[in-house]
Image (cartoon, grey):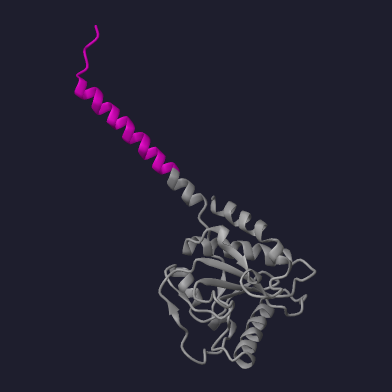
Amino acid sequence: MSVPVPRRAVLRGAVLLGATALTQFGADRDARAVATRIDQPTIANCATWGARPPSSAVSVVQSRPNKIIIHHTAFPNTTDYSLAQAYRNSRDIQNLHMDTNGWLDSGQHFTNSRGGYLTEGRHGSLYGLLHGQTMVQGAHCVGQNSQAIGIENDGIYLDVQPPQALWDSLVWFCAFTCQQYGIPPTEIYGHKDFNSTQCPGLLHDRLPELRSTVAARLGA
């Protein structure tokens, strides 16, 4: 014999089923978020590679950057892919920027070596990146220094492609930076997009590939 079910109980069951479905949807969404989260790459801070102190205080911008700008150093393409060379390169860049250009510190926020080693460029850049709310003002691209993260890729790429290690590190760095600052992968540019320069050479031609690869990493 069937027993009539009160209408209130039916409605309560529907609500519970709906709540369960929403909970499962939320769990699936959270699982996707975890699955696409980008781990922090190893980035050597200024003290680790032996940076000089800035000649004056760096300026901290109290807002997030809205884009990433890709550079190449235009230094000769070394075949030394070691960590020690990455540190030497960071020191060479800082000396050039401070002693020749007259800047207070390295102009770029971060540097990527031909061996795929990442280093902090301008003091304070790594702190800003890891906390995701502020940035230091750079000196890497006229008109964009207070709103764009600049990364120098060691070497000159006017007629040759970068080593795979450098490319892989660049993808990882850009994906992590986009995640930390909420920058869309579509907002990755080259230096020549804003200033009259050949920088970053053939890396500029690969920006569509870089954007799409970073977006895939982020699950976007």
Which region of the structure is painted magenta? 1-28
Q: Is residue 28 or residue 105 the one in the foreground?
A: 105
Pick the front one: 142 or 108: 142
Give the overall secondary structure of the magenta segment. Answer: helix
Q: Nearer the viewer, residue 149 or 28?
A: 149
Q: Identify whether 126 is placed above or below 218.
A: below
- In the image, what residue occupies the spot 47% across and 84% down? 58
Q: Is residue 90 visible?
A: yes
From the viewer's perspective, is 17 left or right of 214? left
Magenta segment includes 161: no
Q: Quadrant of residue 192?
A: bottom right
Q: Position of residue 181 (x, y in %)?
A: 47, 64
Residue 5 located within the stretch drawn in magenta: yes
Q: In the rendered view of the protein, which quadrant contains the N terminus?
A: top left
**Quarter of the rendering containing residue 162:** bottom right
Q: Name the residue furthest top.
A: 1
